[in-house]
Each structure stands twice: as structure tokens, then as C-alpha cells.
């Protein structure tokens, strides 16, 4: 199972809340552990710039819940340790933006201060109530046993355009777990939606006997009196604890986003949960029965560990919100460090946000599609272009003329025939895509592929992170494998550094014999979008040779079938204003 691929990693806290550390294959419950011996050292450490991102959001230093759009301003709330680059002393940090790319940091919005959150202010969501009144729902920790309750907070001054200060009223908590619920696995309230009966509904993630579930609570219009529904909205056996749930409608007609309370026709619903065990964000597409308050995944959506993921790489604890200003649904996620905690402390920071993505339902109705928000393109600077370049087996071409350690690259590959596609080994049918990628990497010559990009590469390829496609034939169908392989990304040999072969399959029609790829390269982040955003993979990498102007970028082909780079556009990316 997926967790075995992460046995040598050392994870830190997701944006939305902490779940576990994994250290040398051992799970350690670390929800409130504070590393005092490390805390005291951080003030003496200079913030390292070597792997720090230029346009992916992160605070100036240290360790990095519910985003919202309100009165023309985007609000990003995130879990942050103001005292160090490791887990502990967590507050709800708050930054605002007019474009989702450049951010202004504000004082923390929520921090432990009351009896109902004395031991922690964990993840939650924002909802805009009638009268244009925002409210935050969040999980509070009330004791050392990690007993979890659901609280709310409201702005102190509605006239403040940035909503800098938030009040936690004394009638908290709003929701307390009953005896049927594991009180230490009861967290992450969703954005609320209003049903046709005029009552509000939210979901809270939980688990019972290894069955992950989302518990539904209902309130009348005052939003203050919540009652547990008779049954969960949905659950699935053998999936473990569900964290950071998200539930929202998507249009069957177009790419426009929908308000969370929308209940019109021609829609599907998406249920996304973060699986505590696999550490991936999984989702299904299905139907929400508003009369029974039950969600039913479509028969094309696998309801479990082998189901669809938002991102097949280093991406967790994500959250969407409806951007009413531009009529779109935006996805925000979190990518933690794959390095060691000691290295995080030395460099003085840990954790980044991948670029915000517009998200919509594919025309097939079977999956979501994601694409970086258009505002990112304002950071594009110097451009280079390559057209109609042929690549035979074993050939590569360097992309020169831009700063490739901080770049945006879009390429369309084409091929004349599918005849050389390799047979798909039946023994791989039970494997995850990343396992197949580990077997058939970028250097293993094939028929149709591997072909793609060698990002953050050293001149002689001692280090590189390839992002590539490989096409297989399975009976009368073709399977497109997309990989982002960090196994050769760094010469660092720390046994705890996580350098996986991330991968996912791409559900794409190959009738035109073309595949597109976009990669956002940002020093320690390689965020890639295959086939227009049908499959997304985020990797965290830490090269030693390929830093700053020492980095190289190549397009390559290691397959017998000749590949044509129809068009390749690459831009140097300016720094975003992040503080």
C-alpha cells in the first residue's frame, strides 16, 4: 500500500492540521508535540535561500486553513508556528491578496486563548452568511487528551477591508462529539451550505473501526444550534481516518464554479477527503440526494485508496472555495518538506503552498481538471520558444535563454504512430502508478516514451527531476503513465530524505497523437500538469548542484518512436511578493 513507499520519510504538519510524523517507518502521534530543544535554536539560524521558492507562497521564515474571497480580497488562513520551522505553537496565520499570487501578511487571526481551544486551534473553513457576513468554523483542542470540538470565530470589525482581527464568542463550542464519536478523531469542519429546507449543513471528518466517514451536522438559519444528522453523509470501509473533507457542486455544462449552496440542475457533487493513512488527497464524483442527505459516488469513481487523487505527488490537506468575483472554484493545497527536520531547522523554514488552481469537471464527467490560476502569468518575464523539434531515441535538447530554476514551461509533444507502445504487463494491474514509474523510469528505454522534461538538471545529469510520459498498450486500449521522479533529484544521501517516483495515469484521448505538459519549476518545487490538467503531480526536491544559475532544462526522448516537440514555450518567472 502507499504508506510503504513513504516509510523512510519524515513528514511535518499539513496546512490544515497535523496528523502524524513518520520517522523511519514508525508512526508517532505528534498532534501537540513541541520540540523545545529545536525551538530555541531557530533564532540563531539564518534563513536559507538555496531551496526557497520565488513564486510559491510561504512566509518569510518558520513553519507553515480555510481560504475565502470577501469584498474583493482573497484571504489565506494557514497553520503556522511563529517560533520555529517545526510543529508546535500553532496559530491561524493570515495573509491577504488581490490576485492569489502576491500576498500581504497580517497578524494571526486565531490562536489558542480560550477554554474551548486552550490546547490547539486546528483546521476549519470559512462560510459567507446572508448579509455578507463571514464566519470561520474551526476545530479546538480542549485538553491534553486531544479532545476535539468545533468552534466559530467572527470578524471584530466588518469595516476593516482585511478583517485583521477575529473574535471567538463565549458560546463556543458550537459542536461537541457525542458518545458514538471518537473525540480525538473529530475535526476539520467544512464550508457550510444551505439546503432547500433553509437549514445549514456542515461535515466533520472522523473514523470508526477503520471506516472513514464525514459526519453531518445541521443548524437552522441562525447558524448557532447544530444537531448531528441520523447518518453520515458518506463513509467507506478500510480507508482509515478522514481529514480535511471538502464537499462542493460542479457544473455539467461549463467550467464556471458554483457556490457551495448551489442546488440547481445539471450538476454533480465532489467529495474530497485527505486520507490519514496514505497521506494523499482522494476524491469521488457523484450524486447528492438532498432529501436523504446522502452522497452516492458514481460507479466510475473508485471509493478508496486506489481512487482519484487531486494530485499524485506531494500534496495534502487541500481546500476549495468559490471565487464569486471571477465565478470560479479555486483549489489551494499544501506541499510539505521531504527533507529532514534538522535540515528544516537549519534553513529556517518549512512548507509551501502550490500555486492556486482553478478546478472544474471534465467534459467526460468522470474526473476533475485543474489549472494554475491565470494571474500567475503576470509573473512571466523573458521567453524562449522551440518549434517542430524532432527527438529520436536517446536524444535531448537543452532549453536555454531563461532562468530555468524559476520557470514556467508549456510544451506539446506529438508522435506519428501508436504502434510502438509497449505491452502493459498484467502483473502491474494491482500496482499503483508510482510503482510502475519506479520500474519503468526515465532512463529505461521504451517504445513510445519515456519522453518529457528533465527539470533542475545538472550539466552532466548527476542530478535531475524528470517529468515524463510513457504509453502502454493494454489489450485494445492505451494507458498513459505520467511520472515526476525525484529519485535522482539530489546527491544528498540522508536516509530520511524522501525521493519518490510519483506517478498517475492520464485519461486522455490519443486520437490526435499529442500530449501536453506544463511544469512550474521553483527551486525546490516541480509542479506539473499533464494533458491540460487532467493529471497533476507536485514534487519537492533539494538539489545540491542544480541551484540558481547552475540549473539546466532539457526536453528528452528515450523511446524508439520519434517524438516531435510541436511547440515549447518557456518563461523566466519573477518573484511574487510574499511578505
Image (cartoon, rainbow, N blue to C red):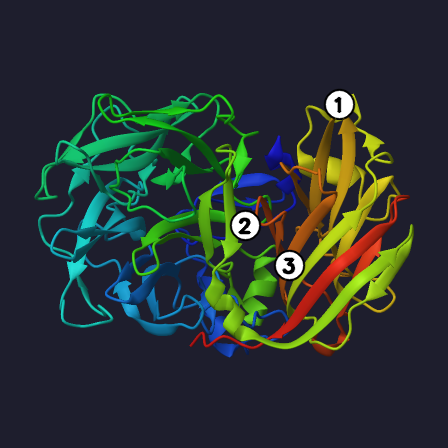
Q: Residues within 10 Å of mark 1 (few under 14, many from 20)?
A: few
x and y, in percent, of residue 481 in the image: 71, 39
Say which element carries label 2: loop
Left or right of residue 482, residue 458 in this image:
right
State the quadrant of the C terminus: bottom left
Q: Which sits in the foreground, 211 or 90?
A: 211
Q: Quadrant of residue 478?
A: top right
x and y, in percent, of residue 449 in the image: 82, 44
Q: CA distance from mark 1 to mark 3?
A: 31 Å
Q: Residue at x 61, y 40 (%)?
A: 25
Say which element carries label 1: loop
x and y, in percent, of residue 380 in the image: 58, 73
Q: Residue at x 40, y 21 (%)?
A: 209
State the quadrant of the N terminus: top right
Image depth: mark 2 or mark 3 in front: 3
Q: Which sits in the foreground, 204 or 475?
A: 475
Image depth: mark 1 or mark 2 in front: 1
Which label was assigned to residue 519? 3
Image depth: mark 1 or mark 3 in front: 1
Circle 1 is placed at which residue position? Answer: 476
x and y, in percent, of residue 276 in the image: 47, 37
Q: Residues within 10 Å of mark 3 (few under 14, many from 20)?
A: many
Q: Is residue 59 above or below residue 220?
A: below
Say which element carries label 3: strand
Circle 2 is placed at which residue position? Answer: 11
The mark that comes first in sequence, 2 or 3, is 2
Left or right of residue 190, residue 346 in this image:
right
Q: Residue at x 34, y 40 (%)?
A: 248
Q: CA distance from mark 1 to mark 2?
A: 41 Å
Which label was assigned to residue 16? none
Left or right of residue 391, residue 126 in this image:
left
Amino acid at each position: 500500500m502507499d504508506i510503504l513507499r513513504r516509510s523512510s520519510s519524515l513528514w511535518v504538519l499539513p496546512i490544515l492540521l497535523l496528523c502524524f510524523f513518520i520517522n523511519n517507518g514508525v508512526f508517532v502521534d505528534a498532534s501537540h508535540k513541541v520540540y523545545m530543544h529545536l525551538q530555541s535554536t531557530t533564532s540563531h539560524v539564518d534563513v536559507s535561500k538555496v531551496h526557497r521558492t520565488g513564486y510559491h507562497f510561504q512566509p518569510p521564515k518558520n513553519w507553515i486553513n480555510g481560504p475565502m474571497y470577501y469584498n474583493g480580497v482573497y484571504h489565506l488562513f494557514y497553520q503556522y508556528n511563529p517560533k520555529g520551522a517545526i510543529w508546535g505553537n500553532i496559530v491561524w496565520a493570515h495573509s491577504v491578496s488581490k490576485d492569489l499570487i502576491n500576498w500581504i501578511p497580517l497578524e494571526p487571526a486565531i490562536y489558542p486563548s480560550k477554554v474551548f481551544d486552550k490546547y490547539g486551534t486546528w483546521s476549519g473553513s470559512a462560510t459567507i452568511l446572508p448579509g455578507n457576513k463571514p464566519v470561520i468554523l474551526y476545530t479546538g483542542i480542549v485538553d491534553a487528551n486531544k479532545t476535539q470540538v468545533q468552534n466559530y470565530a467572527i470578524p471584530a470589525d466588518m469595516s476593516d477591508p482585511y478583517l485583521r482581527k477575529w473574535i471567538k464568542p463565549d458560546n463556543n463550542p458550537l459542536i461537541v462529539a457525542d458518545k458514538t464519536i471518537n473525540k480525538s478523531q473529530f475535526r476539520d469542519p467544512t464550508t457550510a451550505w444551505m439546503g432547500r429546507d433553509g437549514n445549514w449543513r456542515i461535515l466533520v471528518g472522523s473514523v470508526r473501526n477503520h471506516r472513514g466517514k464525514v459526519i453531518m451536522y445541521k443548524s437552522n438559519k441562525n447558524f448557532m444550534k447544530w444537531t448531528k444528522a441520523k447518518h453520515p453523509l458518506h463513509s467507506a470501509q478500510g480507508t482509515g481516518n478522514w481529514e480535511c473533507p471538502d464537499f462542493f457542486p460542479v457544473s455539467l455544462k461549463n467550467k464556471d464554479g458554483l457556490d457551495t449552496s448551489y442546488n440547481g440542475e445539471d450538476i454533480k457533487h465532489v467529495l474530497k477527503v485527505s486520507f490519514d493513512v496514505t497521506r494523499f488527497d482522494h476524491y469521488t464524483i457523484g450524486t447528492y440526494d438532498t432529501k436523504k442527505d446522502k452522497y452516492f459516488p458514481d460507479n466510475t469513481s473508485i471509493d478508496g485508496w486506489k481512487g482519484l487523487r487531486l494530485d499524485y505527488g506531494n500534496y495534502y490537506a487541500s481546500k476549495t472555495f468559490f471565487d464569486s468575483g471571477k465565478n470560479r472554484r479555486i483549489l489551494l493545497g499544501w506541499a510539505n518538506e521531504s527533507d529532514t527536520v534538522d535540515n528544516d531547522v537549519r534553513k529556517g523554514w518549512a512548507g509551501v503552498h502550490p500555486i492556486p488552481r482553478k478546478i472544474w469537471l471534465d467534459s467526460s464527467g468522470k474526473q476533475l481538471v485543474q489549472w494554475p490560476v491565470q494571474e500567475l502569468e503576470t509573473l512571466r518575464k523573458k521567453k524562449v520558444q522551440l518549434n517542430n523539434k524532432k527527438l529520436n531515441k536517446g536524444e535531448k535538447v537543452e532549453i536555454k535563454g531563461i532562468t530555468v530554476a524559476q520557470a514556467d514551461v508549456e510544451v506539446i509533444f506529438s508522435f506519428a504512430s501508436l504502434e510502438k507502445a509497449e505491452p502493459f504487463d498484467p502483473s502491474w494491474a494491482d500496482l499503483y502508478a508510482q510503482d510502475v514509474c519506479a520500474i519503468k523510469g526515465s532512463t529505461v528505454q521504451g517504445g513510445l516514451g519515456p519522453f518529457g522534461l528533465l527539470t533542475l538538471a545538472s550539466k552532466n545529469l548527476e542530478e535531475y527531476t524528470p517529468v515524463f510520459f510513457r504509453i502502454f498498450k493494454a489489450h485494445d486500449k492505451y494507458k498513459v503513465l505520467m511520472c515526476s521522479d525525484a529519485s535522482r533529484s539530489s546527491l544528498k544521501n540522508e536516509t530520511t530524505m524522501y525521493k519518490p517516483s510519483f506517478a498517475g495515469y492520464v485519461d486522455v484521448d490519443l486520437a490526435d497523437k499529442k500530449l501536453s505538459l506544463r511544469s512550474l519549476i521553483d527551486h525546490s518545487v516541480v509542479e506539473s500538469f499533464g494533458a491540460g490538467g487532467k493529471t497533476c503531480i507536485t514534487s519537492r526536491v533539494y538539489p545540491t548542484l542544480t541551484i540558481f544559475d547552475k540549473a539546466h532544462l532539457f526536453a528528452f526522448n528515450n523511446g524508439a518512436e520519434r517524438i516531435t516537440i510541436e511547440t515549447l514555450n518557456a518563461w523566466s518567472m519573477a518573484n511574487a511578493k510574499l511578505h
